[in-house]
Image (tube, coloured by chain):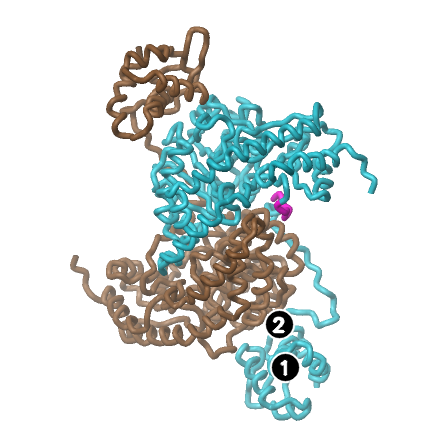
Chain colours: A brown, B cyan
Amino acid sequence: MALSPILARWTEVADVDGLPRQTQLYKLLKEAILDARLGPGSRLPPSRQLAADYRIARNTVLHAYQQLLAEGFLLADRRGTRVAELAAVRSPPGGDEVRRSPRLSQRAAQLQLRQGEAVLPFAPGVADLNAFPWASWARQLQKAWGEVSARQLAYAAPGGEPMLRQALADYLRARRGVVCTAEQVFIVAGAQVALDACARLLADVGDTVWLESPCYPAARSAMAAAGLNAVHVPVDREGMAPPESLWQQQPPRLLYLTPAHQYPLGSVLSLERRLEFLRRISDGWIIEDDYDSDFNHIQPGRALPAVQGLNADAPVIYVGTFSKLLYPGLRVAYMVVPRWATQALGGAIESLYRGGQAVEQRALARFLESGALTRHLRRMAPIYQRRQACLRQALGHAFGANSQILGGAAGLHLTLLLPDARPDHEIVRRAGQLGVTARALSEYYPAESVASSRNGLVLGYGMVEEGRIAELVTRLASTDWRDEDA
Amino acid sequence: MALSPILARWTEVADVDGLPRQTQLYKLLKEAILDARLGPGSRLPPSRQLAADYRIARNTVLHAYQQLLAEGFLLADRRGTRVAELAAVRSPPGGDEVRRSPRLSQRAAQLQLRQGEAVLPFAPGVADLNAFPWASWARQLQKAWGEVSARQLAYAAPGGEPMLRQALADYLRARRGVVCTAEQVFIVAGAQVALDACARLLADVGDTVWLESPCYPAARSAMAAAGLNAVHVPVDREGMAPPESLWQQQPPRLLYLTPAHQYPLGSVLSLERRLEFLRRISDGWIIEDDYDSDFNHIQPGRALPAVQGLNADAPVIYVGTFSKLLYPGLRVAYMVVPRWATQALGGAIESLYRGGQAVEQRALARFLESGALTRHLRRMAPIYQRRQACLRQALGHAFGANSQILGGAAGLHLTLLLPDARPDHEIVRRAGQLGVTARALSEYYPAESVASSRNGLVLGYGMVEEGRIAELVTRLASTDWRDEDA
């Protein structure tokens, strides 16, 4: 009788699991069937006999048998109860442990893995969460929850909550010169979703995408995941600088740009290039990632408006996010699509991504309409300007003639170029040990262009108080010059 | 002087836009430069002269000029101010209107467009939002907001809030027999994201995915968008039924299943097939979409547990969502991945999708831990059972011998098979006019298998009160039998 070794565990298990007795018996029998210790066709003793043999209440046995019969592990016939004809899918305990390799796709292997990094000083891409007007935001959220109806809690309206689309259209027109109406605005769950939508809905596998080199890694990942052929175009002081031959040989189906403040080098895309790209893209699409435009540090009102506004009929998808302004966890971003593409592209977005967060969207709409967001930005602008100036000074002091600082016209980071002697990822590793997060500039370059990659650090100043900057930079510099002794 | 026709609009515009005068002048000049009415190199009059000629305050002119100089539209030299050498990117007003075709990708064309449909009676896939314990949920949300720190508002912890991952692991172990620890649970922004992650991270372009036919359309879209080669496998009373030859000729890299309640036909995948799939998938992955398992209508405790639990070492990705239980707009779903794939797959998920909604995740964790969710499910189970019984009876009465009802072991919908005489999409169209949402069964079949598609209706009963069912079904039936006269 094959049952004895199986039920030998009965007493051990009983005290440990805290499960009802019938569940324990059910589990022991099921496991034995799954690993073929109880083979197909094996007979089980009648419930009364099993109960007597093992001093179990008969009801316990009956329940376990019934559950296994219901799930198809056991069959009842005239002669009693037997194990169904089932293929074994597990090894018996003590057998060879399964060692599988996590066979991911080739495209998964191309992704640049993002380290789960803490929000520490100089982590780029994070605004000052401590300065965010929580009270005012919480009020709007509460108000929105109060208005909630079943409809708002189902999937959000296609394209997003109408009142947010309207508020955003107004905001982007006034603040960024984006020419659009509410119908052209689509709310999505984060900038990454917007990039992903562009990659898949506007281009096919093997199509060419021009990326800035260096580039925002998440954009590169989105394009790789969509199977696009990435061409890495160098960046100079005027932004992306494609050689003329590239237009002939590999014209872009998608052209990904960060015009307001190139990420990470910080160039502002010049007007000449903006117009040139608009003129020549006719057979493709420009993705304008305006990620960093909300903080312009050059004279207010003097920042270049969005590329989209230069020609509202051009094939431009304008992408923006609230992550920088409010808080990254909110996961609300938006795409502005050309009027003539609204219906087709809107339908496709809708069928790939289900919207949600209607409550947050309504709160956000009011936050925009009431002017609370603009007030917050206005309040933060001089604070960020001072932090940038302070960081600039501290970097100059600590790294001196060996370094060069790029960027700062907008956004919340500066990029420090360093001599190649000490590789940036080494500095980053050691800075991490000292509680400072910096990103290595070389990581923003694609693996293919390691040769042309520059050595340096990308330093966010959104989350670091002015008074701490000098000390933190000193700490950062110490990783560079001091000899390692541990 | 080319300025006269341009500034002729000055007075018209002035009253309309409500913009500051300097902004109006800036806009008029900028537009003229962009459409080359003011060509490259054109000289502009000195600000003093322009101000005098057009009776504009000189400061207004100065501001407009300065803004255009800052943006690079104008250049200043010894002789004064001229238009920069810029390529025109717009047609002048009155020129040919741009007519562009919204050139989407070929894969976008393959997507099944989802109609933005209202949540009306019989819309499938929606639980009873009115019955949801809002007060208790709102309390948890409020509590979570109260605990908020900057960290929680940044990107969520990789994989999701630890307390939610733990609560989910406990919940899935107890309720669905999923064998996992918290580290294997990954929180994502909706089931669609989970399917998308599987399609891209586990398979490459051209790889084979087996889909049920008929199938959940959003799963088909996710696979199409990832460039996979879909094989549509017929479904019978025991779930997906692949012919033996298919295993040899087109073995699946991905195998997408809805074992608990096939969507939309409602079969429960038999134990034999579950074990067979587990045994034969060795070189690929099973995606177990347990979308509908939370409402088991067969004898409690008798539902088949998850496929994943039959062999925790098998390459199974278990996918579930809170949309059905709480509200679709919440957008929180989860994937359980095998222990041996946790690190590699977790890293890849992290680099493609940024998590967020830490506050909601914490609220959800408490909602699970406190037992509030289980209580809600227990309360709703008999209500849904009665609705199903009522719908079943009403359908039998109204459609009688001409019909057959499928499904109902779990979930929140029934599928009604109808004779082919009256195409289902026609019934759906007319039902919509009568305020009833039903889905055409034929739409769940891929375009390639139109020949084998069955005619019928997919009817959700989650959102419809018991007392209204009979009347609504009568209305629905009227669209089928009554002659159209309008």
Q: Quadrant of residue A275?
A: bottom right
Q: Chain of mark 2?
A: B
Residue A394, image x, y percentages? 30, 74
Residue B114 colored in magenta in the image: yes
| Image point (33%, 21%), residue name | A25
Spatial CA span between label 2 and label 1? 21 Å
Which residue is located at x 39 percent, y 73 percent? A384
Q: Quadrant of the C terminus of chain A?
A: bottom left
Residue type at mark 2 is Ala
Question: Amino acid type of disc 1?
Answer: Leu
Q: Measured from the top left, where is residue B174 in percent x and y? A: 38, 33
Q: Which quadrant would residue B234 be assigned to in this image?
A: top right
**Residue located beneath label 2 in the image:** B87
What is the crowding at mark 2: few (fewer than 14 residues within 10 Å), some, or many (at least 20)? some
Tell me whether marks 2 and 1 sit on the same chain: yes
| Image quadrant assignment for residue B454 | top right
Identify whether A307 is placed above or below B462.
below
Indicate which disc residue B25 carries. Answer: 1
Q: Chain of mark 1?
A: B
Q: Residue B438 location in percent, x, y?
A: 65, 38
In terms of depth relative to the viewer, which is nearer, A484 or B308? B308
Instruction: Give the SS element for disc 2.
Output: loop
Start-end of magenta stretch: B109-119
Nearest to the observer: residue A454 or residue B383: B383
User: Going by the picture, which residue comes out furthest to the right?
Assistant: B485
